[in-house]
Image (spheres, grey):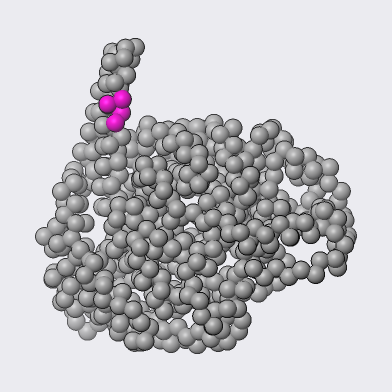
Amino acid sequence: MGSSEAVLQVFSRTVPHHFFTDSSFGKLKSDSTHSSKNYIKCIDKKVSKCMQLGSGPFGNMTICRPSLQSCKCHPSERVSGITAEDVNGTWFVDNANKLNTINGVVNGPNVLEFQDVQQSKQEKDGLTSNGANGTVVRDEFRKISVDSIEDEAWNLLRDSVVYYCGSPIGTIAATDPTSSNVLNYDQVFIRDFIPAGIAFLLKGEYDIVRNFILHTLQLQSWEKTMDCHSPGQGLMPASFKVRTVPLDGDGSATEEVLDPDFGEAAIGRVAPVDSGLWWIILLRAYGKCSGDLSVQERVDVQTGIKMILKLCLADGFDMFPTLLVTDGSCMIDRRMGIHGHPLEIQALFYSALLCAREMLAPEDGSADLIRALNNRLLALSFHIREYYWIDMKKLNEIYRYKTEEYSYDAVNKFNIYPDQISPWLVEWMPSKGGYLIGNLQPAHMDFRFFSLGNLWSIVSSLATMNQSHAILDLIEAKWDDLVADMPFKICYPALEGMEWQIITGSDPKNTPWSYHNAGSWPTLLWQLTVACIKMNRPEIAAKAVDVAEKHISRDKWPEYYDTKRARFIGKQAHLYQTWSIAGYLVAKLLLADPSKARMLITEEDSELVNAFSCMVSANPRRKRGRKTSTQTYIV
Ligand code: GLC
């Protein structure tokens, strides 16, 4: 049985037939480049489960999902043992042809070649840098070295691909042959796969992304518990692993199972709020790039989208439209004082809401959901644009705030004490430019600059056009702090001293200017590039790529860099980190063809703009009495 047939069987045996109103899995067969002829059987192990999610503002939902995804294989056909001969597809052929292994260390030749080229380049520079010929030669060498970096990156990316039942379904977080402490870096992380998936989409290799989307969807309703507590339905795992386990009752045979981690094994037991949001964003990108809308139209995929939305839009105690989350629920997945309403989650939330709205099939049952979604989009954009934004002018306003205002008209709504404006910020804020702060709570503004949140606010149009330009102005003005020797600082500045002790819990991995505490993460290059392309300022991203290219390959594609100027490879950084590699590739590919960035960008729609301007003119900051506004904002 071919692997695609195998997957077909896994899905069709676990989900009732009426869920497959289209023939997309039939199509999978013909699309797939794989025919792992050695797989004897790949069937699902357990019967499907149907859960009634009940009625409510979002209508009735019945979910039928398997309780365990598995694929049974005979021992000699284990995926891990596959060679180039096992599969006809381009993946393994490419891998086998391009990758060389030196003492088990993948990628020797390209690194060496690049070092040679760099060395010759330096020699040439020394000899001829003054003449016109020198410039030509230098350019030529630079081109060769850049090409070889890209080739190397592609080889490494392909080498990180993880297979399930013979089909590619994701990429491993890091393939660091020097690391003795793998932790969970041998898993497929949802967030880490996004740039890898985008790189494959840009290359026209769609299968891996489609498989990833559909298999992670199957994991969505996994029975997940932590100490007898089950998190909400709709949660997507942080990561998953393909495990080869002995087949029940058959000593010689094995089966493959997908084993997800929803945070119940993760360090700190953090729930990955960003996973489902990224999943929606990737799903839209897949449809836009491949032109294959059949995946997003599938009933089970539509249900998956609704489950994520239902979880995010559920009522709570909150007064704010922003999502309330615990510390460590996103890329920064350990204690860094970002609990509450961190910008990164809000930007991804906004982006996912817009993407979902575009993909949800219009049907009677989802009218309430769409209405809730539209109202949330509006309230969220108003809240972030108004209350998270700071620039020199706003800072001065805060500096002069009155406090303890009890009234509907309060200007200082969150009762921010001006003394919170730290000396570093007064120095740091450029006269041209501004940014969205990291978090907002009663009596607390987290003034740290968080890069991903700001960049994705540009990409998703959560920030206004002016704000988006101002963020890029700030990045240019603060280049030495945010880029320096390696793009891009995850946040600025670092928590130090007592603040570090209290906020991180004295985390030795998050020491000042390291890791999440203002370390520099090359993967952020791709989000920077999309943001710059959206604002028609690609030269900023191109400059950052140039900086990265100088040594990222020689440094073996680290996960992150340390020190204020990103001068050291991070103390505990994994090497050959897949999303560092993929982030670089996506940046290169998009700069070569900026129109492709459209699959990730969401433009603000005019209805939202209109409703937004109504809200702005009714804002209490502009002195409105409590009852004067009778408008409802249903877009
Ligand atoms: C670290 C990062 C997280 C990433 C994971 C795998 O835990 O903090 O963002 O997803 O490594 O690379």
Q: Is residue 367 magenta?
A: no
Residue 341, image x and y in percent? 64, 59
Does 410 sit above or below residue 395?
A: below
Q: Nearer the viewer, residue 101 or 118?
A: 118
| Number of callouts | 0
Does 111 sit above or below residue 192?
A: above
Residue 356, image x and y in percent? 50, 67
> Residue at left 41%, top 45%?
594
Q: Magenta segment range?
A: 139-143
* Left or right: residue 457 compared with residue 628: left
Q: Quadrant of residue 81?
A: bottom left
> Residue at left 13%, top 70%?
37
Q: Quadrant of the N terminus?
A: bottom left
* Left or right: residue 119 compared with residue 423: left
Residue 376, image x and y in percent? 64, 67
* Left or right: residue 87 compared with residue 614: left
Q: Quadrant of the C terminus?
A: bottom right
Hey, which residue is sitting farthest left in the picture?
85
Residue 405, image x and y in percent? 88, 56
> Residue at left 68%, top 62%?
611
Q: Nearer the viewer, residue 195 or 600?
A: 600
Q: Nearer the viewer, residue 594 or 503?
A: 594
Dominant secondary-structure state across the stretch colored magenta: helix
Residue 573 appears in the rendering: no
Does 33 sit above or below residue 506?
A: below
> Residue at left 65%, top 41%?
434
Residue 243 appears in the rendering: yes
Does 226 sit above or below residue 119?
A: below
